[in-house]
Amino acid sequence: MLFKNAFHLMVDNFSLNYKMLLYKIVVGIVTVALCAALLYPTLRMLATSEPLKELLDLIREFLRAVVSGNTEFLQTFPDGLQESLSALVAYIGEKTPNLVFFCVSLVLIVLISRFLSGMGDFAFGVLIDDRMSSHANTAFFSAFIGNLGKAALWQVVYVPLTFVYDVLSLALCYVFFLILLNVISVGFLATVVALLFSVALLLAAAAVKMTLFSAVIPALVSDKMKLGAAMKGSFTFTKSRFSTLFSTYLVTCLLILCINALFALVTFGAALLITMPMSILMLLCIRFVSYYTCGQKKYFLAEDKIVQPKERTNENFYDDFEL
């Protein structure tokens, strides 16, 4: 029911996808401008270096080998990858001042981009809440300005926390990938299994993050809670419902990955202009539907359909059950 109602809510508010797309394009332009100003000189230096060229050539050969099933190359890939990475690290070590400036600038740009993106997500959460509570059509600019302070405070806390979490998750997946390459002796099998489990681990980590913070934005928007109370309430909210929320987010993340990859492939990337904002909106809808459902609040799923969650008891459980 959670996934189905969230999907119906997203479809009923499909016009928000275009507003989401425009906002993300603006954030993308700001991010690209910062990258051009701060990162381009160092990137140009690295792009013309021999170690990076060798690493990219190795990765291209690896992809060809995976597609063609060249097991002979895949057996030597782990050693070749380590050698190429070592050569690249040694080259970068000779450019320490450039590297420090690049890393600091990169972290700042990522944080700024996430902050701006999160501000928009908060505003879209307000729009979704207004649709669910009263089926009102609130203007995006009005929602953005009216919740600027609360959204900024939330992003100041959320962005650094999730940035550290994401970096640790990526590092863990990379280490896990290398371990599996060395543990499994068969080259082609090692590569496939390592990629499979690394991606699965990354999706699971993303689902855990979404589950833990699932109720914060709905609590801030719908119940006008203070940030501390909203975060505490989110952990309490997810404690008894962790398995349900986690499985919903995990399946949704997997579907988002598959749909975006498939549509990007068959439309040469054009469909991403629709599927990417839809993915973000779907995750927001899951947050609010789960919050309203578990809080026993009625909400508009569409203009002519109001959902009134029921308390399930042993007596009426099978009567209330829906597929």
Image: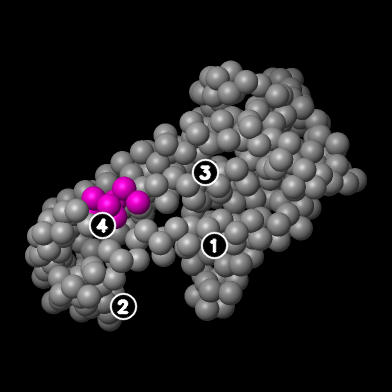
Work out how far the residue at label 3 is from the one at label 2, CA to CA, in angstroms: 38 Å
Q: Amino acid at mark 2?
A: Val
Q: Which residue is mark 1?
A: 29
Work out how far the residue at label 3 is from the one at label 4, CA to CA, in angstroms: 33 Å
Secondary structure at badge 1 equals helix
Residue 102, magenta (yes or no): yes
Secondary structure at badge 4 equals helix
Q: Which residue is mark 2?
A: 67
Horizontal and vertical percent position of residue 295: 70, 24
Question: Mark 2 near mark 1, Cβ–Cβ under 8 Å?
Answer: no
Q: Nearer the viewer, mark 3 or mark 4?
A: 3
Work out how far the residue at label 4 is from the one at label 1, CA to CA, in angstroms: 35 Å
Q: Earlier in the sequence, mark 4 or mark 1?
A: 1
Q: Earlier in the sequence, mark 3 or mark 4?
A: 3
Instruction: Say which residue appears at 78% left-offset and 52% top-offset.
Output: 12
Q: Earlier in the sequence, mark 1 or mark 3?
A: 1
Question: Mark 3 near mark 2, Cβ–Cβ under 8 Å?
Answer: no
| Res 194 label | 4
Q: Which residue is mark 3?
A: 115
Horizontal and vertical percent position of residue 304: 90, 45
Secondary structure at badge 2 equals helix
Q: Amino acid at mark 3?
A: Phe
Name the quarter where the C terminus is drawn.
Answer: top right
Q: Is residue 240 visible?
A: no
Work out how far the residue at label 2 is from the one at label 4, CA to CA, in angstroms: 16 Å
Instruction: Say which residue appears at 49% left-offset and 67% top-offset.
Output: 261
Q: Is residue 222 visible?
A: yes
The region drawn magenta spans: 99-105
Instruction: Say which residue appears at 39% left-offset and 47% top-offset.
Output: 108
